Image: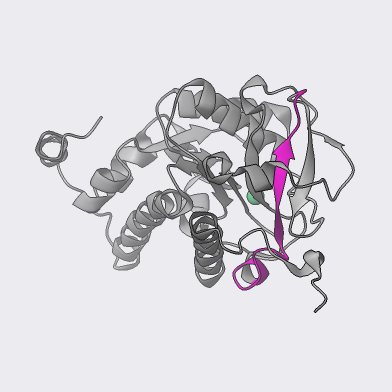
Amino acid sequence: MIIDNHMKSILENREALAKIVNDVAEVAGYLWQKGWAERNGGNITVNITEQVDDAIRALPAISPVYQIGTTLPHLKGCYFYCKGTNMRMRDLARWPMDNGSVIRILDDCASYVIIADKPVKPTSELPSHLAVHNYLLAKGSPYRASVHTHPIELVALTHNKMFMEKDVATKMLWSMIPETKAFCPRGLGMVPYMLPSSVELADATIKAIDDDYDVVMWEKHGVFAVDTDVMAAFDQIDVLNKSALIYIAAKNMGFTPDGMTDEQMQEMSVAFNLPK
Ligand SMILES: [Zn+2]
C-alpha cells in the first residue's frame, strides 16, 4: 500500500483541533448566509497553540518564510488557523483546509511559515489580526479567536456621525432587547474611518479593545470581534446586529423606538453581574 502523506490532513485524529476548524467553517457559513461576507470579505484567525502537539511542532514548512511586517514578541512558537487571502467565506464553509491554513510563528517573532494542509497564503489582514492576538496574550486574556466581517445594519449605523460618538450606538443597541446587553456586555467600540489593512487601523482597534470592548466597529466598513472562540465572537456580533434590525423595524413602522430605560438596563447589569 502506498501512503501519500500529502493527502493527510493535520485535522486527522485531532478531535479538539478539528472541532475548532469545523467551528470556523460553520461561522463562515453563517457570515455568508447573513449577507455579511460578499466576495472574499471578512477574516477569521484562531490561536490554536493549545492544540499543538509534538508531531505538529515537527511538521516541516510547506511555504517560504513570510515576513509579518512587525515584531510580535508574545507570539513566539504560536500557531494559528487563518482564512486564506482572496478566499470566500462561502467556500471556507465547505472546505476550511482548502481556503485557509495553519501557520507557525518563527522564533524571531517577525515571520511565519505555513505548515498545513496546503500552502494557502493567509489573509492580507494577517498583521493586524496577529497584532491583536499578541496584545491578548500579553494581557493574559483567554480570548483565542478574532472575526472581521461586514454586518449590513451595523455598518449602516456608522454612516450617521451621531452613532460614532462614544457609546451612543452601544446604548441604543443595548436598549432594543435585554439579551444584547447580557451577551455583548462590553458594547460596541467605535473606530473612525481608516484605510483597510493599515497599521493605523490595527493600532486603533487594539486601543479600542484595551478600552474594554470585545466588538469594535470600523466606520463605514465592518466589525472586528474577539472572544474565547469563533462561535462566541460571532454571537456577540449577531446579537448587536439583531438589535440594529429591531431599531430599523421600528423606524420602518414609522416611529423611533423608545428603548429600555436607563433603570431597566441598570437592573440587567445588577441581575446578571455585567461589567458595564
Ligand atoms: Zn473588511
Q: Is residue 94 magenta?
A: yes
Q: Residue 126, position in %: x, y?
A: 71, 41
Residue 197 in view, yes or no: no
Q: Tell me the quarter of the picture where residue 204 sits.
A: top right
Write down the region rendered in magenta: 91-108
Judge whether residue 251 can be spotted in this image. Answer: yes
Reply yes or no: does residue 33 show up in magenta: no
Q: Is residue 103 above or below residue 168?
A: below
Q: Vertical placement of 229 versus 2: above or below?
A: above
Residue 152, position in %: x, y? 52, 59
Residue at the image position 38 percent from the left and 41 percent from the top = 169
| Residue farthest toward the bottom in the current orientation of the protein | 1
Count of numbered marks: 0
Residue at left 76%, top 49%?
115
Q: Is residue 142 left or right of residue 253?
A: right
- The relative height of residue 215 versus residue 44 in the rendered view (above or below) is above
Query: Which of the image's four quarters has the N terminus?
Result: bottom right
Question: How far from the left and from the top, in percent, is residue 87?
Answer: 73, 62
Q: Which residue occupies the extreme right position in the image?
A: 64
Indicate the quadrant where residue 142 lies. top left
- Given residues 164 and 237, the one toward you in this image is 237
Quarter of the image where the C terminus is located: top left
- For this rendering, which residue is in front, 249 or 138? 138
* Residue under the image location 80 percent in, 41 percent down: 113
